């Protein structure tokens, strides 16, 4: 599935740059979640699945030590053009397996949404491995009453019940410290630590 998702996002037909924009707008509601979390991180941050670099670049502008990790080469190139002073790595979560690098915070903002129950546990275990002691993970995902795949505009994504996502995080060695989901909308987030 990882290769299929990478190919789907790498397609010229997927215009993420124009869908989201390369910069974070002042009115973006996600700032109310991401910025307060970043204030609690005492060390380097890794933006996993950094896409076109909008959150990586935004956090760098706010003064945080942050780098991006993105599997789609054209997104990496676009990020480097938009934010030349920020480091963007071309690679996936699986490329972090066995890494000696450590981060105090990992941002996974809608970057794990295409992983189902066969893939997500391993990815979370890898992310836990590269977090420093007492480091935190902030992740967003789509939630719902049942764990089901759905037709995302780019590639199949999954809705995870909050309880199931918390369980998978706990199984990977994380402790949940905050969670939010309004059942009237699919968007959810969790902050977890080790």
Image: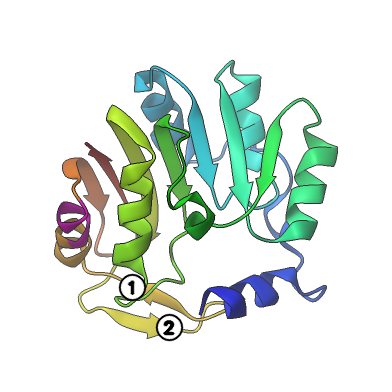
Task: Tell me the residue that label 2 is attached to.
Answer: 150
Mark 2 neighbour class, 10 Å CA radius: few under 14, some 14 to 19, many 20 or more: few
Specify the label residue 159 is tagged with: 1
* Magenta run includes residue 171: yes
Q: Secondary structure at mark 2?
A: strand
State the image coordinates of residue 183 (x, y, percent, origin top left).
24, 64
Front residue of 89 and 20: 89
Front residue of 30 and 138: 138
State the image coordinates of residue 4 (x, y, percent, origin top left).
60, 80
Label 1 with label 2: CB-CB less than 8 Å = yes
Q: Residue at x 70, y 61 (%)?
A: 72
Q: Secondary structure at mark 1?
A: strand
Name the dominant secondary structure of the magenta segment: helix
State the image coordinates of residue 27 (x, y, percent, origin top left).
57, 36
Q: Residue at x 74, y 55 (%)?
A: 75
Q: Residue 92 lies in what quarter of the image?
A: bottom right
Q: Which residues are magenta?
A: 168-172
């Amino acid at each position: 599935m990882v290769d299929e998702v990478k190919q789907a996002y790498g397609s010229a037909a997927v215009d993420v740059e124009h869908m989201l924009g390369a910069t974070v707008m002042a009115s973006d509601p996600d700032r109310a979640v991401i910025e307060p979390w970043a204030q609690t991180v005492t060390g380097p941050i890794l933006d996993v699945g950094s896409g076109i670099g909008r959150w990586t670049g935004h956090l760098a502008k706010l003064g945080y030590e942050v780098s991006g990790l993105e599997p789609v080469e054209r997104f990496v190139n676009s990020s480097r053009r938009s934010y030349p002073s920020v480091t963007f790595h071309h690679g996936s979560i699986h490329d972090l397996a066995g890494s000696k690098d450590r981060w105090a915070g990992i941002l996974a903002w809608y970057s794990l949404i295409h992983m189902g129950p066969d893939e997500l546990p391993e990815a979370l275990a890898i992310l836990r491995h590269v977090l420093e002691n007492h480091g935190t993970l902030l992740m967003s995902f789509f939630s719902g009453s049942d764990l089901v795949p759905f037709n995302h505009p780019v590639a199949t994504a999954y809705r995870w019940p909050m309880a199931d996502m918390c369980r998978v995080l706990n199984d990977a060695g994380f402790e949940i410290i905050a969670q939010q989901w309004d059942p009237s909308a699919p968007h959810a987030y969790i902050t977890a630590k080790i």
